[in-house]
Image (cartoon, rainbow, N blue to C red):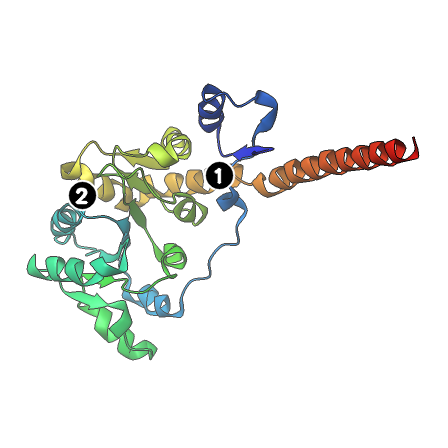
């Protein structure tokens, strides 16, 4: 009953063809996420610039990745630049358990929901913090504006990965684990461009993040990430063209059917 399949990549097209879908019914339009409006940085990010510390984001993390984040945090905490982590668990029911785990591992955790609204007070709260835990919804994408490097979750465990474009569009180098099935094509492009690295396991996470904390390595990776993100634009007009084509085909078919009925009535 599907007239036209608009898919993100050739890989998805091949899957549909293997299921028996006619080639004419499948068009590769790319990901609509590439044409979405960039999120604005949340107001609470303003004090971070005054801290003068690199910001590491652990985004959309799942159960099974918390230990890896805690270990990487511990590995990097001794650096002279003392990174501030923004940790964003994927599901709200995990906010409290993840905060507890990180605190038990010695991290000073500040909850986003309890961060003072006043800039000076917020800065004071963050000065001694190791982790700002994002226990809110809808703010992660905007946080990439302040990020130095990002680990995108759902990749150290077999989930398949989450949105890499949000980080890439902000010029943030990316680290992912081996499970990138749902974002494979984009992940491969970012890796090929030098904007991302894939770590084989949790033990390599800290070292990979530290690599992008080096300004000389981070600068070209940032440029490459934005370039790859720009390449992803154009899905919206391609999708609309596919929709218009279907509407025209359906409209012509409906007119032909009306004419045939009218002619039959005359006879």
Q: Which residue is mark 1?
A: 227
Residue 81, percent across and down?
21, 55
Q: Is residue 232 above or below residue 47?
A: above
Q: Residue at x 35, y 62 (%)?
A: 137
Circle number at residue 206: 2
Q: Residue furthest right?
A: 266
SS class of the residue under badge 1?
helix
Q: Looking at the figure, which quarter contains the C terminus?
A: top right
The quadrant in which residue 82 appears is: bottom left
Evaluate whether residue 194 shows in this view.
no
The one nearer the camera, 201 or 48, is 201
**For residue 80, side relative to residue 264 (left or right):** left
User: Which of disc 2 and disc 1 is earlier in sequence?
Assistant: 2
**For residue 34, side relative to residue 144 (left or right):** right
SS class of the residue under badge 2?
helix
Residue 162, percent across and down?
35, 44
Q: Looking at the figure, which quarter contains the N terminus?
A: top right
Residue 104, percent across and down?
7, 60
Q: Residue at x 59, y 27 (%)?
A: 25
The quadrant in which residue 196 appears is: top left
The one nearer the camera, 32 or 3, is 3
Give the Cα separation between the discs numbered 1 and 2. Answer: 26 Å
The quadrant in which residue 252 appears is: top right
- Label 2 neighbourhood size at 10 Å, few (<14), some (14-19), many (20+)? many
Q: Residue at x 20, y 31 (%)?
A: 200
């Amino acid at each position: 009953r599907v007239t036209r399949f608009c898919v993100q990549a050739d890989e998805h097209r091949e899957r549909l063809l293997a299921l028996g879908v006619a080639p004419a019914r499948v068009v590769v339009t790319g990901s609509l996420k590439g044409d979405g409006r960039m999120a604005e940085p949340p107001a609470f990010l303003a004090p971070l610039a005054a801290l003068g510390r690199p910001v590491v984001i652990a985004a959309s993390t799942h159960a099974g990745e918390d230990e890896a984040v805690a270990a990487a945090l511990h590995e990097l905490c001794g650096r002279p630049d003392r990174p501030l982590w923004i940790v964003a668990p994927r599901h709200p029911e995990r906010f409290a358990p993840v905060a507890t785990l990180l605190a038990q591992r010695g991290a000073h955790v500040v909850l986003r929901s309890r961060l003072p609204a006043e800039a000076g007070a917020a800065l004071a709260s963050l000065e001694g913090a190791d982790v700002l835990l994002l226990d809110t919804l809808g703010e992660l994408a905007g946080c990439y504006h302040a990020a130095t490097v990002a680990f995108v979750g759902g990749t150290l465990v077999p989930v398949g990965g989450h949105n890499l474009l949000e980080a890439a569009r902000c010029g943030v180098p990316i680290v992912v684990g081996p499970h990138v099935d749902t974002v494979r094509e984009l992940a491969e492009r970012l890796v090929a461009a030098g904007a991302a690295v894939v770590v084989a396991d949790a033990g390599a996470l800290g070292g990979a993040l530290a690599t992008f904390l080096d300004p000389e390595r981070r600068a070209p990776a940032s440029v490459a990430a934005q370039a790859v993100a720009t390449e992803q634009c154009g899905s919206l007009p391609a999708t609309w063209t596919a929709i218009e084509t279907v509407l025209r085909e359906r409209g012509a078919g409906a007119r032909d059917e009306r004419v045939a009925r009218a002619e039959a009535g005359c006879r």
